[in-house]
Amino acid sequence: MSARTLFDKLWDAHVVRDLGGGVALIAIDRIFLHERTGSVALKSLRDSGRTLLDPSRVFCTMDHIVDTLPGRGDSTLMPGGTQFILETREAAREAGIRLFDVRDPLQGIVHVISPELGIVLPGATVVCPDSHTCTQGALGAFAWGIGSTEAEHALATGTLRMSRPRTLRVNFEGVLPPGVTAKDMALALISEHGSVGGNGYAVEFAGSAVRALEIEARLTLCNLATEFSAVTGFIAPDEKTFEYLKGRDCAPLGAMWDQALQQWRELRSDEGAQFDREITLNVGELAPMVTWGTSPQQAMPVTGRVPDAGVAGSSAEAHARALGYMGLETGQALAELPIGAAFLGSCTNSRISDLRRAAAILRGRRVADGVRAICVPGSMSVKRQAEAEGLDVVFRDAGFEWREAGCSMCFFAGGESFGHRERVISSTNRNFESRQGPETRTHIASPEVVAASAVTGRITDPRSLVAIHGLAGNNLAGGPR
Amino acid sequence: MEAFTVMTAVAAPMLRDNIDTDIIIPSREMKTVSKTGLSAGLFAGWRYTAIGGREPNIEFVLNQSAYAGTRILLGGSNFGCGSSREHAVWALHEYGIRAVLAPSFSPIFHGNCIRNGIVPVTLAAADIAAIAAYVTEAPQDHCVTVDLQNCEVTAGAQLRYSFSLEGEAREMLLEGLDGIDLTLKHRAAIQQFIDQDRRARPWIYQGA
């Protein structure tokens, strides 16, 4: 057989039937739902008189609407939100699927709990009506976001009708400098190649710098594939992946584990396999990145100055609009910009290694006066692990709010948002206009930059605050079990 | 789903890049577990003068009488990026939009359009700018035609562009087909796949 890419292998293994015209019926191994877009899929399916093909492979969590305030329950500040929570609970019960409910000790953000519980596995197809489903590709899965109608299709038939995407391999080579993370790799890629640079592609992240990343950092990297307009992003599984998964709740055991491992070791692009496109980036010179505009492609090193339109790769009009929205001028240094708030959380950066790295900067320091700082662990398991390590005390002592798990103020989850035109440093994934609040000015960055900026009250290069040795997150094994 | 063949209608230019689904329908406007009742929240942040309010912002293109009856949007690149919420497409459809012309679309939004009878037409930015310039002269008279049968967009006597739709998208839209019905015809093949796969990859089926 000729050399195949990892994507070819993932695709071929799931073709139920070739439907002609480049379209195939693809078998879906795992469906994850949440209370915002999953409830409507379950309801619509029920109303149509159809049933789920296999409820045992369908999961649901409460993350998009539920509050993250301490002591939360079913009520929420989100308009109509309680109805979503109640209807999701009822629909999940009727459908017979596993629900990680508001008070479930395993509840959390879908793309945090699925890897944490071993629900996503190498070689599996995973879909969820959520754009950041590509996160889960970090374990060597084919995982992508869909709409509610597609979710309904997958629930009813166990398949999706798909056009085969083209393949792109992004090779990150070299060694990440201390204090520079997977988040910075992703933002560097998107700023260099644009927010539509990956449009229509299934993107394999490869290269020595990717191999060197721990699993949680890989999840962060793949998370941002959707901000690159890719269909999905994924990484070939390796010994780190297998070590991470071994013993997790839903991972196979015993002889079945051995059998799985044998197959999973084949999940890599063959030598000489042809991609439709390849990109190589050297990470050796990367610095912590911060977005300055209203698209993830409008990012630059924290040490830099706001570029002019010609350099930034946006149209002059889009550039001017972004500057106006963000209250910035060309040539202005990003570092030193005063912030009103700092947010640590989201499916991008809310795992235990993210919290540990932020806490290492916050230990013995205080959030600057006038800055509202919030930490939202990605799952209740992450929260318990952090508390066992005393990280909650570090965050609280520094002046951070310590929340329950959920999507929270990455957007409007829980019905909460930041202030009008407030400048926020955020470990999230989208700096779109009004994403975090009315005309709120979001700067996306790594947890390190969020923590350092919270302390100084200005956008801050964490390397200027502390000597960062071995903090890069690519050498912290991790994850609660 | 209703079929789409040819439509001639008023088109509104919204030539901004990265119009995301949060702009198309903000989260706060998705108040019930339903695919309907969403059009009032369409473009709410731009369309109304205040958050949660309903007083029209007259600056916004769809609020202008010149663009009454708009059924086609002319957008910028990466249209529909961001959240996968299909509510964005449901809101557009309920409002009356049946085609969006843009230089590129978010893959998820593109798929959601196909499932709901909205034609996502990919054209070069310069071509869309030319159509927008023509439309702007007299929006009610200078209508745009989207012909899915011939995969062609025309505007006036001068502007004519062909486009393509990958895979079975065109057929699904032309026939107004329901994907689930089509797929359920392959029920036997699906069951056969699962039976074989269960032996090859038992860990996928071991339950949770």
Image (tube, grey):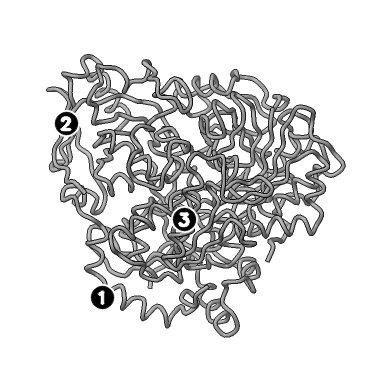
**Disc number at residue B145?**
2
**Mark 3 and mark 1: span between their CA atoms?**
31 Å
Host chain of mark 3: A
Q: Nearer the viewer, mark 1 or mark 2?
A: 1
Give left or right: position of A323 versus A165.
right
Give left or right: position of A300 versus A153.
right
Q: Nearer the viewer, mark 3 or mark 1?
A: 3
Q: Is residue A282 visible?
A: no
Q: Provide residue A98's location: percent of width, then percent of height.
A: 51, 66
Q: Is residue B164 visible?
A: yes
Q: Which residue is mark 3?
A: A88
Q: Provide residue B142's location: percent of width, then percent of height.
A: 17, 20
Q: Which residue is mark 1?
A: B188
**In the rendered image, the vertical position of residue A297 relative to residue A268, given as above or below:** above
Q: Tell me what residue is drawn at x 28 percent, y 27 percent.
A: B128
Q: Amino acid at mark 3?
A: Thr
Q: Amino acid at mark 2?
A: Thr
- Assign a secondary structure to mark 2: strand
